[in-house]
Image (spheres, rainbow, N blue to C red):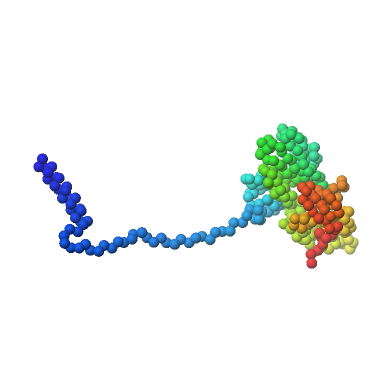
Amino acid sequence: MKNKKILAILTIAACVSVVAAGCSFGGDEPEEQVVVDATPTPEPTSTPTPEPTIAPDVQDSTYTSSNGAVSIKLPDATWSNKADEADMLSFESPEQGKILILHGQGEEDMASAMLPDTQDLAAALEQASDLTQGTDFEIQDYTTNDVEGVGVYSYTVKYTDASKSGGYVYNIHKIYKSSDEYYSICGSVANDASYDGIKAAVDSFGIAGDSGLKAAAPVKSDDAAAGQADGSTDGTTDGSTDTSSDGSSSGTTGNSGGFTQEQLTDTNQTRTIYRNSDGHPLVITPDGNGNWVDFDGNTYRFANNEDVYDQNDVDYYWHGEGADVYYMPVE
């Protein structure tokens, strides 16, 4: 019991000593205490200058294949290349769709390729995928054209049930074909809003390399007039008349797109029309079936002597000019 009393006294004494150390006992007044603010002043941080973001639809989206053979202007910068081989190019946009370009050359490739050079064959290829024409799909805007011996075939497949077509509502096809070579371009469209952009991309396809199909699909610049001002598809620029070694003229000019002088000025054979939205010029020719077509096989109809509409009802204007104004040398 005595030990417990001693332990209790020692414990109380220890507590008192701690309190006394923190307080001033006695007659002296406490010294003035200085309160130090221990919170450090924050260092100012510099705000990074934001990098300007270019909208995807105004970025340069022209893609040239690794071998330099072909190029295509993609709808916008959301598209990425997925494959780049000599016989295949593919591109994809997560929200818009896909574009596939196939190339074949030689007897073996031509024998194995299924190239729909008739509308019936185009429909048969879809039916081979267990789709019913009129119920599951329809063939739209099928056109054929011959450009310097190259067959150009264009059409669109519209699907009524995207669940049966891999999630796509349209497939836009364009085929360039000769006896021993072909290019096939297919744009798969995921939604209606993406149709125009993918259609324009398919139409922008151009051949820059050594190919017998080059005349039908020349490489296009953003400004077709500027692109053609450089001359014909073989790069001639002087606009002079081709002359043989004996001094005679071949009848076509170096900057004439392969037309003779008579064809350039005869508006029954060639016409230059201008897109109303931006003044974009292009040359059209009759196809022998009552239609006017451009080099890509797109068709045009004249509502009167001035107003022209293409197969998608885009409006153009005709000033009564032949192709000579399109190929006129730039001073």
Q: Nearer the viewer, residue 281 or 250?
A: 281
Total marks in image:
0
The spot of residue 260 in percent (x, y) is 87, 57
Q: Nearer the viewer, residue 5 or 256?
A: 5
Which residue is at a point 16% across and 60% down the rendered structure image?
Answer: 26
The spot of residue 124 in percent (x, y) is 77, 35
Which residue is at a point 68% across and 46% down the rendered structure image?
Answer: 193
Please identify the residue farthest to the bottom as the structure is shown. Answer: 331
Q: Is residue 167 visible?
A: yes
Question: Which image quadrant for residue 25?
Answer: bottom left
Which residue is at a point 31% across and 61% down the rendered structure image?
Answer: 36
Residue 2 is left or right of residue 281, and the answer is left
- Quarter that holds the N terminus: top left
> In the picture shown, does residue 325 fall above or below 217?
below
The spot of residue 72 in percent (x, y) is 70, 51
Q: Is residue 181 visible?
A: no
> In the picture shown, does residue 243 fall above or below 195?
below
Q: Nearer the viewer, residue 294 or 244?
A: 294
The spot of residue 3 in percent (x, y) is 11, 42
Residue 162 is left or right of residue 6, and the answer is right
Question: Which image quadrant for residue 231?
Answer: bottom right
Which residue is at a point 73% across and 40% down the rendered structure image?
Answer: 158
Question: Which image quadrant for residue 112?
Answer: top right
- Quarter that holds the C terminus: bottom right
